[in-house]
Image: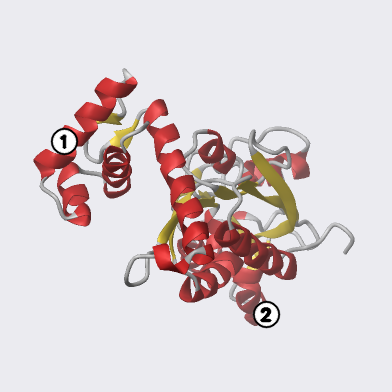
Amino acid sequence: MLDYDSLFALAAVIREGSFDRAARSLNVTPSAVSQRIRLLEERIGSALVIRGQPCQATEMGRRLCQHIDRVRLLEQELHDALPTLATEGTVRVRLPIAVNADSLATWFAPSAAAFAAESPVLIDVAVDDQDHTAEWLRSGVVLAAVTGSSRPTVGCNSQVLGAMRYLAAASPSFMERYFSDGVGAGTLVRAPSLVFNSKDELQTRWAHRLCHRHVELPRHTLPSPQAFVTASLAGMGWGMHPMSLIEPYLKTGALVELLPDKPLDVPLYWQQARASSTLLDGLSKVILAAGRAALIQPNS
């Protein structure tokens, strides 16, 4: 049998990022947390925590953290079925999920917030590019994710959310400065673009689709969808923006499309671990409804 006090200590260290903060969250001493982790590592025969700032889980540590998340979901199910077993007060279950920043900034956050306001959960959101969130599922860090991959991760279900429509846009002054001779490979190679991080390929994909070849784009890095909008309004660069985020600025003319009728649609999917849980299923139902209402559907 596994020592669940030690497993809870492991999960707290990874969640909080340090032994001290984990100890405070568990109402024990840091030395008690350290001893529990040490005993668990000896029992497993493998390192579980990479000590650092913050502490991170090894591959085996991530698997055990996922196991704890599932155990908590199952315990919540049992408490709902047998209320006499429930402890006093509300016990909130951690639901770790991964989502791309543009979804979080547009349709995802309101739906997740509404669910969390009415449910005994603590939603723990990790942000990554939609082409990489599936890795969080594969590593066991999260139980569900908004991802660009339709292929289900092992142990997960995959359902269509819809496609997020992106528009290449910039300020009128930026357009005049860099694209007065038109938008093509020759002008794009000189016009600063905006990227979220090194994983962000949307601008490159749009330029490749337009020019039918790779174009090396100069770029500013801004890890925030709202900062993209602010930077574009200021004339810092052009970027691929979620249509819903910049519609007001397009209507006023504060932003303009680089080329009309040249959107980039990115399909999104909701993948969830096949854990029997009304809480996880409830969150999935809310997210699927919100995504399908906000995103472009295949038959539209």
Pick whichever of labels 2 and 1 is earlier in the sequence.
Answer: 1
Which residue is farthest top?
Answer: 45
Other-residue count near label 1 (Cα within 10 Å), few / some / many at <14 / 14–19 / ≥20: some
Front-most of residues 224 and 29: 29
- Amino acid tagged 2: Lys
At x 40%, y 62%, the residue is: 85
- Element assignment for label 1: helix
Image spot of residue 115 (x, y percent): 54, 71
For the N terminus, the quadrant is top left
Residue 121, image x and y in percent?
45, 64
Instruction: Residue at 42%, 67% (x, y): give it.
Output: 84
Q: Which label sits on residue 67?
A: none
Judge depth for marks 2 and 1 and give the one in front.
Answer: 1
Q: Which mark is residue 34?
A: 1
Going by the image, does 178 lie left or right of 60?
right
Q: In terms of depth relative to the viewer, which is nearer, 46 or 265?
A: 46
For this rendering, which residue is in front, 5 or 13?
Answer: 5
The percent position of residue 59, horizontal first and vertical second, equals: 41, 27
Q: Is residue 232 visible?
A: no
Q: How many marks?
A: 2
Type of amino acid at the residue the image marks with label 1: Ser
* Residue 249 image-quadrant placement: bottom right
Residue at the far right in the pictured view: 299
Residue at x-position 70% and y-position 68% = 289
Name which residue lies at 74% across and 59% down: 259
Q: Which residue is mark 2?
A: 251
Q: Are marks 2 and 1 in contact (CB under 8 Å)?
A: no
Tell me: residue 252, above or below residue 187.
below
Q: Marks 2/1: CA distance?
A: 57 Å
